[in-house]
Amino acid sequence: MAAIVLIPARMAATRLPNKPLADIGGLPMIVRVLRQAESAAIGPVAVAAGDPEVVEAVKRAGGRAVLTDPDLPSGTDRIMAALEILDPTGRYDSVINLQGDMPFAPPSVVSACAEALARDPACDMATVVAPEASPADRANPDVVKAVMALAEGATMGRALYFTRSVLYGDGPVWRHIGIYGYRREALIRFTAAPPSPLERREKLEQLRALEMGMRIDAAVTAVAPISVDTAADLEAARAFAAHLT
């Protein structure tokens, strides 16, 4: 499959405004995400930006960015708009959506998502999961859990559902990581469909795909990368960057 990696980013995040340009160890967060995606070396990388400031920051760093409508309702709609600008002839048949708030996403995790998508033609979408970080994850609505059909010891399996609710029982709880791979035709179908009932109920966009009958496969990684959603997350990311240097 010919893949392109697109990174949606906008300044008007509800919990942490202007976060794409937040300084983390001397680099804007969006530039750190860009570098991680480039290191995965699975295809060209571009930022799907909702604001001119983000485009400028990426271009100053030598990256590629396109400006999309700031009023688009989701990051998925943003990458669809960017794909139409960057690849109107359909050269790339798969799209990896790497969230713009994951400044230390390991390149291996990005590659694992692409591999999960490519390994079976019946797979419409792919994503990544990691083991729960602590028992508290099970009751935390901010931690999205993936319900998996996964054989013991397997590193890839089928995602049956995603939820913010508590999961009970003795089995493993898989923490969902917000990296997605789409076959191009699946992305087109998905963004053309309205939000679904379960999507609105759980506030999880991927449930729309499941309600549409799409198959989502997931690769397992050892640890969930840092995701920056709040001021506290940003401080943790800065501390992590300082430790790296």
Image (cartoon, rainbow, N blue to C red):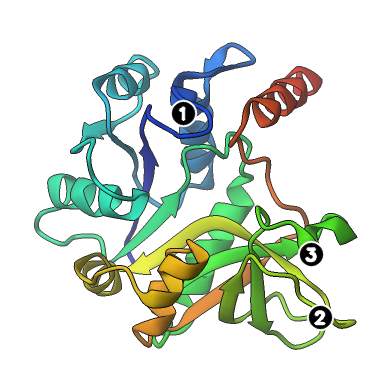
Q: Which residue is mark 3?
A: 138
Q: Residues within 10 Å of mark 3 (few under 14, many from 20)?
A: many
Q: Which residue is mark 2?
A: 153
Of the numbered discs 1 and 2, the one sitting upstream in the chain is: 1
Residue type for callout 1: Ile
Of the numbered discs 3 and 1, the one sitting upstream in the chain is: 1
Tell whether 28 sits left or right of 141: left
Marks 1 and 2: CB-CB under 8 Å? no
Q: Which residue is mark 1?
A: 30
Question: Of the residues tagged 1 and 2, which is closer to the observer?
Answer: 1
Question: Of the residues tagged 3 and 1, which is closer to the observer?
Answer: 3
Q: Is residue 146 above or below residue 33?
A: below
Residue 101: percent from left, percent from top: 53, 37
Question: Of the residues tagged 2 and 3, which is closer to the observer?
Answer: 3
Residue 137: percent from left, percent from top: 79, 58
**Disc 1 to disc 2, how far (Cα)?**
34 Å
**Disc 2 to disc 3, how far (Cα)?**
21 Å
